[in-house]
Image (cartoon, grey):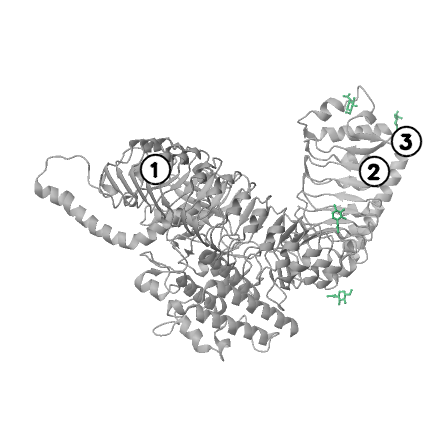
Amino acid sequence: MEISSIFVIFVLLLVHCLMASTAVAVRTNITTDQSALLALKDHITDDPYKTLASNWSTTSTSVCNWIGITCGAKHHRVTALNLSHMGLSGTIAPQVGKLTFLSHLSFRNNNFHGSLPNELASLRRLEVVSFGLNNFSGMLPSWFGFLPKLQVLYAYRNSFEGTVPESLGNILSLKVLHLRENKLSGEIPQEIVTLPNLIEVTLANNSLTGHIPNATFNGSNIEVISLYMNRLSGNLPSSIGNWLPNLKVLYLWENRLEGIIPSSISNASMLTELELGANYFYGFIPNTLGNLRHLERLNLVNNYLTRESSTLELSFLSSLTNCVNLTSIVVADNPLNGILPKPIGNLSTSLEEFVAFNCNIKGIIPREIGNLSNLMTLSLYDNELTGPIPTTLGNLRKLQGLFLQNNRIRGLIPNDICHLRNLAELHLDHNELFGSIPTCWGSLSSLRNLYLDSNQLTSIPSSFWSLTDMLQINLSSNSLSGYLPLDVGKLEHVTQMDLSWNKLSGDIHAIKGLCSLVNLSLAHNKFQGPIPQSFGKLISMERLDLSDNNFSGEIPESLIKLKCLKDFNVSFNRLQGEIPSGGVISQFSALSFMGNQALCGPPQLQVPPCKTTSQTTTSVIIRYILPAMIVAILALFLIFVLMRGQKRDAKLKGQGDLLPLTTWRRITYLELEQATNGFSETNLVGKGSFGSVYKGTLSDGTSVAIKVFNLNIEGGFKSFETECDVLCSIRHRNLVKIISCCSNIDFKALVLEYMPMGSLKKWLYSHSHFLDMLERLSMMIDVASSLEYLHHGCPLPVVHCDLKPGNILLNKDMVALVSDFGISKFLGNEDSITQTMTLATIGYMAPEYGSQGIISTRGDVYSYGILLMETFTRKNPTDEMFVGEMSLKGWVRQSLPHSVIEVIDSSLLKRGEENFNAKLDCMLSIMQLAITCSTEAPEERSNMRDVVATLKSIKLKFLKDVRED
Ligand SMILES: *[C@@H]1O[C@H](CO)[C@@H](O)[C@H](O)[C@H]1NC(C)=O
Ligand SMILES: *[C@@H]1O[C@H](CO)[C@@H](O)[C@H](O)[C@H]1NC(C)=O
Ligand SMILES: *[C@@H]1O[C@H](CO)[C@@H](O)[C@H](O)[C@H]1NC(C)=O
Ligand SMILES: *[C@@H]1O[C@H](CO)[C@@H](O)[C@H](O)[C@H]1NC(C)=O
């Protein structure tokens, strides 16, 4: 301990002695307690249930009868004060420090604020203290450490700051320490982890840093260690499991821990909950986890863990069959790369949740999975599963959510699925299912959200439409044919219905009663007949896409009542007559109406005017026929270009919408104006090609970035729409999150998460900042992961099109997030391409994009390669040294493999420095990867899945080399 802290403790002790002696001199009694309590009452500013106001009164009874007060039998002094759950506001009066006989003190769950008065340090008889669930702030007081009898300290869910006081290590009697959900920082003091009697410690959800101290709780009786959501780093002590014989709960998720999961963990034989998710753990999931007989919950989500490599089977799952009370297994987002073993059927029948999405799981789903009779959630999406859906899934009678989307599951949907009477969410989309949807479908009475899109299904049974509680239905991109029966009209709660890209025909009168519809897409089918007049009653409708069918007749006047309509498309039908003016319909662009037979209306919709006035033939030709011909030629061109892009857009809009948008906050122009001091210059943080970005603070204190689109320039509106569409339909931890959109006719803005650290560009080229090799590599993995998600993990692939250091933003933890989706594009499927005329940034643009406007995911891979080179060479591709034949790419390629050091940012790598060889190796591998990303021929480029895998293994190798050096 430092001299200064010894001095502080000495002074504190001295103060305590003095206070104790003055107390003796004054001879306190119950009157002292009463005036202390009245002072406490005086400091309370709000007492919503009038609990104290009516009860704590001096006129009637002794304080010992007041609510919340307990007095000692012998000495008739206040020993317990319990004001929990009273909804009180105010601060704590310093006089509370005079209640010197107190042993129990609870202010739990109120709205007290301010800091804790130092006078409380004189309550030396305290055993149980709760300040939990208030708004207390200031430093977490170190005098807690001088309360010699303290056993339980609750200070969770407040805003205490500073470090965890080392002095807490003095309290040998301490059993329970709950400090979670505060703003504590610094390291976990060694003094605490050696407390012999501690049973529960929660420091979760703070900002603690540093390592988990070696020998944590060695030899103690600890049962609960909860440190999740901090910034702890380093490895777990390798023998950790050997010294925690009583440990039941270990929560370490969302930290920055790395290294392997020590196999000693299997010796902590009382463990019931082991949660290590969202860290950087790598290596094997130990096969000995099955030794933890009492294990109930296992969560390893989002690490770099894999299976033991002796067999292809995920044998750790077989070992878990020993855990008879296991209810939850969550191992998603790990490169497990294996097959599901048959013994999976012998896992505990208590199992309620099995979550293993995005794990590169191959092979079939074993039939044995049908033994897990209490399973409620089965999530295996985003894997490489093949084979059929096992019929035994029908035995999982408690199943509520089945997520098998994005695999290569092939075959019929088995009738057995119809037994799942509790199933509410069913996602089988993006597989290779064919045949009819089973005719027994009507028994899935709990079903609410159904996604069967992107398969090869051929027919919808009539019982399908009897599920009248359905909310979301997506059957798009199949080969469904037939008519929509009148029963469709019974789905009166359905909000999202996407039937696009099928071969459905007949009229659509049945839809007119679906009054809850928000999003309806019937695009690219063979529907015919008129658009029903009664569609004007579907007043919740925001997106209506009827494009590319055979609808005829007029656009009903009643549609102008659809006030919420944001997207409307009737292009490529056989509609005629006047486009309804007034209301929303005529405010959509010409693209919504193109390709029809004989629509007429205002000139901006590029249709002929409706009124026929007498005019000379020449003026008719000049005024109407000529422009019409030009329009027709342009339209033909546009049709050619847009048919694919537009179709895919439409298809995606349907799907994107099906993602939950309800978490959005509505934000008005006025709020944004206030948040940015009237869009003042001082709040302006950047200007781009499509508008300006302001920093703002919303009324609740959230910092946000507000991107205001300039609607006066060409493309401004489109850019807003595109960015909105993209950001609303995707979600990934390395993509900038959208908080809200603000869209008026003449003002469009996106409200985005604020990124306090600015862009990668700023960090790379600034002279005051420096990013080391590992930081840059981690950021590049972040960026690659987001692209992997955009290209391979979204409902429809998204191409970013403008990847560069300026569009990569850093959050407060220096995690890289990709932003700026103003010119991105949706594609129909992974390998498809589209064409465009929007311009990306010179230097990062793939050659086929620059010369022919061809867009594909491979174009992003090219830009990513350039980005990799720039990040580690600190040379911009448009740097003046790259003239004539010499480009950044050429310069890097020439240096490989022997003189790579010549091109690497000189501050990253110097001969003779520590770990030089490991660094050089790492740089060489990265530059080689960069070159394979940016080869000239698109088809020779790598893809983002492989890039992510390669980068992660480069990082692992580097970390390992450094350790062994
Ligand atoms: C408490 O002590 C004060 C003086 O120190 C005295 O005036 C008062 O009467 C005492 N009250 C009781 C209840 O003994
Ligand atoms: C105060 O509350 C306590 C406990 O609810 C009750 O016993 C007592 O009678 C109340 N006193 C007054 C004056 O309301
Ligand atoms: C942690 O402690 C163990 C034994 O208690 C010791 O073998 C090991 O070297 C220590 N590790 C560190 C990093 O101090
Ligand atoms: C499983 O849970 C039951 C009921 O809670 C309990 O009695 C039993 O001891 C547990 N078994 C194990 C191995 O933990």
Spatial separation of the CA atoms under disc 2 and disc 1: 74 Å
What amino acid type should be assigned to the residue bearing mark 3? His
- Identify the mark nearer the N-term, 3 or 2: 3
Nearest to the eye among marks 2 and 1: give it.
1
- The answer to whether residue 15 of the structure is visible from this angle is yes
Residue 752: give x, y in percent of width and height: 48, 47
- The correct choice, above or below, for 510 with respect to 239 in the image is above
User: Which residue position holds label 2?
Assistant: 103
Q: CA distance from mark 3 to mark 2?
A: 14 Å
Q: What residue is at 27 percent from the left and 34 percent from the top?
A: 580
Characterize the local packing of mark 2: few (<14), some (14-19) or many (20 or more) Cα atoms within 10 angstroms: some
Determine which residue is flagged by label 3: 75
Residue that numbered label 1 is attached to:
508
Residue 144 in picture, x, y percent from top left: 78, 45
Ligand 4 has an atom within 8 Å of the beta carbon of the residue at disc 1: no
Closer to the N terminus: mark 2 or mark 1?
Answer: 2
* Percent position of residue 63, x then y: 82, 26
